[in-house]
Amino acid sequence: MMFKFLATFALSYLWHGMGTTIGYHRLLSHRAFNCSKPVEYFWVLGGYLAFEGSPLWWAAIHRAHHKHTDTPLDPHSPRYGLKNAYYGWMTKSTYPPHINPRKLCPDVAKDPLYRFLDQGGNWQRSHMLAASTGLLFRAGLWGLFGWRVALASTLAGVAMLQIPLLLNVVCHTPALGYKTYAREDDSVNVWWVALLAHGEGWHNNHHAFPGSARSGLKPHELDLSWLTLRMLQGVGLVSSMNEATREKHVALIEKGKETPPSI
Ligand SMILES: [Zn+2]
Ligand SMILES: [Zn+2]
């Protein structure tokens, strides 16, 4: 019985985690690789059932975060208050004037399902829809497989709801990690966030190469989402992956688009 609980938790944690990292983040927000719609929906559903909210909302907020990192227009920079960076930014009722999801994410807004989940930009309605879908899904699991499976799945979903929120704060607090790339923003690499968030904790690397499907760059920087994407590429489910390389970064510096790396 305990085995069933632990196995469901582990599998759910992987699916919901990578639904967020591979689906919401690397695919919808950064278009770091290509895949078919069924593969896209498989990952995005994993994120949606981890209470991540409207995919269009998530991608628009995230693109705004990259565009305005650690400035007053960044939706969740800890420079302007910890509480707002952690969860305060989510409690607004709609998009701030400088974030127009249709303009920032025309590619995501093209999908009618994502437009529906965004509920016309009404955050309360889209959050409610995501929360009720997540709870209905667990009620279904309870009916089909019993309370242990439903509880393990709920706990994995709630854990994955927390982790990106935590990442926004921890990986933008310089004292808590290291910088491989000297950038003007506060992004840092944090090993334990990378472990919890399947590779997303290498956040300084990510800000240096936002379009890369790979965030762990040094040999010790384990990036489970990247390894999974490589596996999916191997079996033909994913194609055209962008991969960060040192050479590409040096080219950016030469074009004057980046500050020089610190090492
Ligand atoms: Zn960031
Ligand atoms: Zn990003």
Image: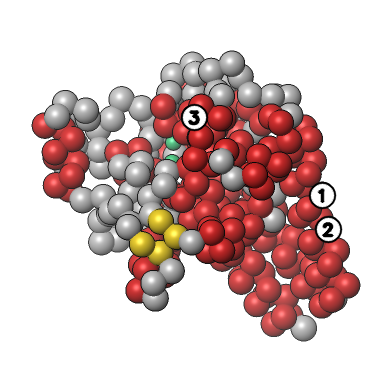
Q: Is residue 219 among the parts visible in the rendering? A: yes
Where the N terminus falls, by quadrant?
bottom right
Residue position marked by numbered label 2 in the rendering:
136
Quick check: is the Cβ at mark 3 less than 8 Å away from ligand 2? no
Residue at 25% of width from left, 56% of height from top? 218
Q: Nearer the viewer, mark 3 or mark 2?
A: 3
Residue position marked by numbered label 1 in the rendering:
132
Residue position marked by numbered label 3 in the rendering:
104
- Quadrant hosting residue 261: top left
Given residues 46 and 160, the one toward you in this image is 46
Q: Secondary structure at mark 1?
A: helix
Q: Earlier in the sequence, mark 3 or mark 2?
A: 3
Residue at 74% of width from left, 39% of height from top? 127
- Quarter of the picture for ligand 2? top left
Q: Is residue 251 above or below residue 240?
A: above
Q: Residue 245 in the image: x percent, y percent?
A: 21, 51
Given residues 137 and 162, the one toward you in this image is 137
Q: Residue 5 in the image: x percent, y percent?
A: 72, 75
Left or right position of 10 against 206: right
Q: Secondary structure at mark 3?
A: helix
